[in-house]
Image (cartoon, helix red, strand yellow):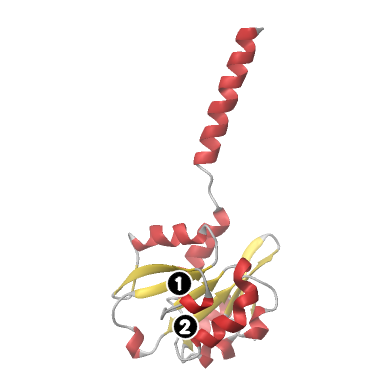
């Protein structure tokens, strides 16, 4: 009996250890691909087509590590990809895309004030943020990751939206 308990305990420890080490956030992977693909359907002003293409993230999310992995192999046109993490709205610096995590949604007004003079695509993941200034908002419909597009909010930041992106969006405002 003692041997059986030892075997079961050993198997439990081994099994638990492997699962914890290989946890994959599929949703974060999908969002990372979406964000990267948004770069193909949005046109930034000429001054943003030099240097690195910067994606900023404000808040806590496993999306950050997924985007970091992309920097190793992906480029946006001729620009290398860079990912920056910001803790507060006041820390936000110039970036092409800023992703606002759900835990920072209440800071949206401060974030928009900070972005006022930049050409930044604001991407969010919480209900009601399209009305407050978000350009793209992630939603789940029929158990699938989708996104809403507020073309007016995107264009307010001197960005041009491809009609192909409009066609891919779940809703367009």
Circle 1 SS class: strand
At 33% from the left and 89% from the top, the residue drawn is 47
Number of numbered discs: 2
Vertical placement of 41 versus 80: above or below? below
Read off the residue under disc 1.
56
The answer to whether the residues at label 1 and label 2 have Cβ atoms under 8 Å apart is yes
The residue under label 2 is: 120
Q: Is residue 46 left or right of residue 120?
A: left
Above or below, comparing residue 136 to residue 32 in the picture: below
Q: Position of residue 71 (x, y in %)?
A: 36, 63
Residue 117 visible in rendering:
yes
Displayed quadrant of residue 96: bottom left
Mark 1 neighbour class, 10 Å CA radius: few under 14, some 14 to 19, many 20 or more: many
Callout 2 secondary element? loop
Q: Earlier in the sequence, mark 1 or mark 2?
A: 1
Q: Position of residue 18 (x, y in %)?
A: 51, 34
């Amino acid at each position: 009996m003692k041997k059986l308990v030892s075997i079961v305990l050993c198997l439990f420890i081994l099994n638990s250890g492997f699962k914890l080490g290989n946890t994959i956030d599929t949703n974060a992977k999908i969002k990372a691909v979406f964000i990267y693909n948004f770069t193909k359907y949005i046109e930034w002003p000429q001054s943003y087509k030099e240097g690195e293409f910067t994606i900023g993230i404000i808040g806590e999310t496993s999306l950050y590590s997924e985007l970091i992995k992309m920097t190793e192999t992906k480029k946006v046109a001729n620009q290398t990809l860079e990912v920056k993490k910001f803790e507060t709205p006041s820390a936000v610096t110039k970036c092409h895309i800023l992703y606002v995590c759900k835990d920072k949604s209440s800071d949206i007004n401060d974030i928009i004030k900070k972005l006022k003079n930049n050409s930044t695509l604001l991407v969010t993941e919480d209900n009601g943020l399209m009305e407050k200034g978000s350009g793209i908002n992630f939603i789940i419909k029929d158990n699938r990751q989708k996104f809403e597009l507020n073309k007016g909010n995107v264009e307010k930041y001197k960005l041009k939206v491809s009609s192909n992106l409009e066609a891919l969006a779940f809703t367009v405002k």
